């Protein structure tokens, strides 16, 4: 350590892993005035990703699933730097903020062109280089398009708040246009909505989309009838929800069939054009559509891809049992950007919020122990269960691996768990009200652009 009086802990990323790491580190180390904890993120808010599909289908307002980091940090004793990390040097032990766009995320939001202010007039970030004694890589992942032609260009990923709002705008716009079009082929294309990927995200999105379309949009646009929209789920594997428990798979298949959502399995997307999707595998199809939502995979963050450390085939850092990056002392990786495989297991842990939060807790304990000269503890994952919402106030869940809940009880449990994890005391009642209004009133058919 350079200066024992000044230990710097740098946490990169304020998602599930990073925000809990910063909060709990500052709690645990609050008496240590010689320790500085800095959290960095390209956004000034923490995003609750599990509710993105509700934003994308008009049931929850975008601002209700984000929590400003400055609000979270109040009174907690960690610093926050808003900016994009461009490079990490593990040898020099420094993270470099984007220099040209050190303030780019602010500029985007400020819309300086509207006020005729040239960009160089803005003060750049005070801290462009951040050095550290301890580094926490919690940068998450990014959508994996697997280099399939046209997917990155034409698909709609569901990964960020902007993605969710873009999907919501696009779907409502498709209805607006279809309402004015007589050509049957064009109407069919506009009203065919495809979701690629039948994991939890794809299933939750398509069932919520179903509710929005049949309970609101079809009722709103007088020239669009119940029989016009087509909802299709395409999946590369043999079945939907391949990693979920049997009861979850069975109930989800049944609910989707009742909703008349077409499921095409063994049919990986092989090419996408603006208005056409092609799939291959055992079930090849060509379908005219203007909407393909991509929920078919996540890979490691691109910054991590550039690091000279061991990575897995989707670009996540391979960590040891203490969540450290081997070969670089006091460097940890957690959450979606880390590959952790427990001894005796065939697969690494999945990229979920549960994993990220539990890893954050273990890493806090390990940094604390290391600072105090005590041996670190090995990470043990405890599966708390899984849940998938299926629209129409239905969800299936499997709690602790053996309590199976479905229907309304499953839905209620799912809502309560999400509410518990949603950050910000003032956000919870707003979301409860939105869920209540969603039960009692129609959702909005069209929305104004957000952000
Ligand atoms: C649509 C959707 C639904 C989901 N539903 C569930 C669910 O129901 N249950 C569940 O357990 N999990 C769910 N997940 C997965 C869960 O959200 C992730 O596993 C979890 O967010 C991972 O946390 P993380 O902290 O590793 O990464 P993230 O939450 O992705 O956070 C990473 C952070 O790093 C920041 N960042 C990235 N690059 C940079 C950079 N260069 N500079 C500065 N900052 C940067 C990002 O802005 C972000 O804030 C869902 C994911 C999605 C996309």
Image: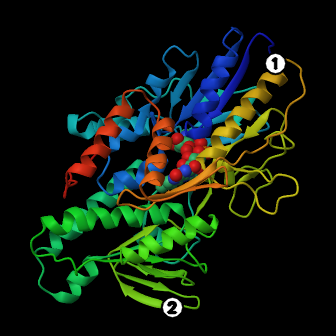
Q: Horizontal and vertical percent for residue 118?
A: 31, 35
**Pointer 2 local density, CA inside 10 Å: few below 14, some 14–19, many at least 20:** some
Instruction: Please tell me whether residue 129 is drawn above or below residue 229 in the rendered image.
Output: above
Residue at 51% in and 68% down = 251
Q: Kindly identify which numbered label has been placed on residue 284.
A: 2
Mark 2 CB within 8 Å of ligand 1 = no
- Out of 377 and 439, give the one closest to the viewer: 439
User: Which picture quadrant has residue 21?
Assistant: top right
Q: Horizontal and vertical percent for residue 432?
A: 34, 39
| Residue 276 appears in the picture as rendered | yes
Instruction: Please tell me whether residue 314 is drawn above or below residue 106 in the rendered image.
Output: below
Residue at 36% in and 73% down = 259
Q: Horizontal and vertical percent for residue 170?
A: 28, 63
- Out of 304 and 312, give the one closest to the viewer: 312
Q: Kindly identify which numbered label has been placed on residue 2.
A: 1
Instruction: Please tell me whether residue 377 is drawn above or below residue 384 in the rendered image.
Output: above
């Amino acid at each position: 350590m350079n200066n024992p009086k000044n230990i710097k802990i740098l946490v990169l990323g304020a998602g599930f892993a990073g925000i809990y790491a910063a909060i709990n580190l500052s709690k645990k180390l609050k008496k240590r005035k010689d320790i500085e904890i800095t959290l960095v993120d390209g956004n000034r808010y923490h995003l609750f990703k599990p509710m993105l599909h509700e934003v994308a289908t008009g049931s929850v307002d975008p601002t209700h699933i984000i929590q400003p980091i400055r609000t979270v940090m109040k009174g907690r004793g960690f610093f926050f730097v808003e900016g994009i990390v461009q490079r990490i040097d593990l040898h020099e032990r420094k993270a470099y903020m984007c220099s040209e766009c050190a303030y780019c995320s602010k500029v985007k939001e400020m819309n300086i062109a509207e006020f005729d202010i040239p960009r160089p007039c803005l003060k750049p970030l005070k801290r462009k280089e951040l050095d550290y004694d301890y580094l926490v890589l919690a940068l998450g992942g990014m959508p994996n398009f697997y280099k399939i032609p046209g997917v990155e260009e034409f698909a709609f990923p569901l990964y960020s708040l902007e993605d969710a709002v873009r999907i919501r705008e696009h779907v409502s716009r498709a209805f607006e246009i279809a309402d004015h079009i007589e050509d049957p082929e064009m109407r069919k294309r506009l009203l065919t909505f495809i979701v690629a990927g039948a994991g939890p995200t794809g299933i939750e999105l398509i069932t919520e989309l179903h509710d929005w379309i049949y309970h609101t949009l079809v009722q709103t646009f007088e020239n669009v009838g119940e029989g016009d929209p087509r909802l299709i789920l395409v999946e590369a594997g043999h079945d939907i929800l391949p990693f979920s428990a049997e009861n979850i798979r069975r109930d989800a298949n049944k609910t989707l069939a009742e909703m008349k959502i077409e499921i095409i399995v063994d049919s990986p997307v092989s090419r996408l054009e603006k208005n056409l999707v092609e799939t291959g595998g055992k079930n090849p199809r060509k379908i005219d559509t203007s909407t393909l939502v991509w929920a078919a995979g996540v890979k490691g963050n691109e910054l991590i891809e550039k690091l000279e450390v061991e990575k897995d085939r989707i670009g996540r850092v391979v960590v040891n049992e203490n969540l450290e990056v081997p070969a670089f002392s006091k460097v940890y990786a957690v959450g979606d950007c880390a590959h952790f495989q427990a001894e005796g297991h065939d697969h690494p842990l999945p990229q979920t919020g549960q994993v990220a939060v539990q890893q954050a807790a273990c890493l806090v304990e390990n940094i604390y122990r290391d600072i105090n000269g005590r041996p670190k503890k090995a990470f043990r994952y405890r599966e708390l269960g899984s849940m998938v919402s299926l629209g129409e106030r239905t969800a299936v869940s499997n709690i602790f691996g053996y309590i199976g809940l479905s229907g309304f009880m499953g839905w209620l449990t799912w809502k309560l768990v999400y509410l518990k994890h949603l950050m910000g005391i003032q956000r919870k009642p707003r979301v409860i009200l939105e869920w209540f209004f969603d039960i009692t009133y129609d959702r909005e058919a069209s929305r104004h652009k957000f952000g």
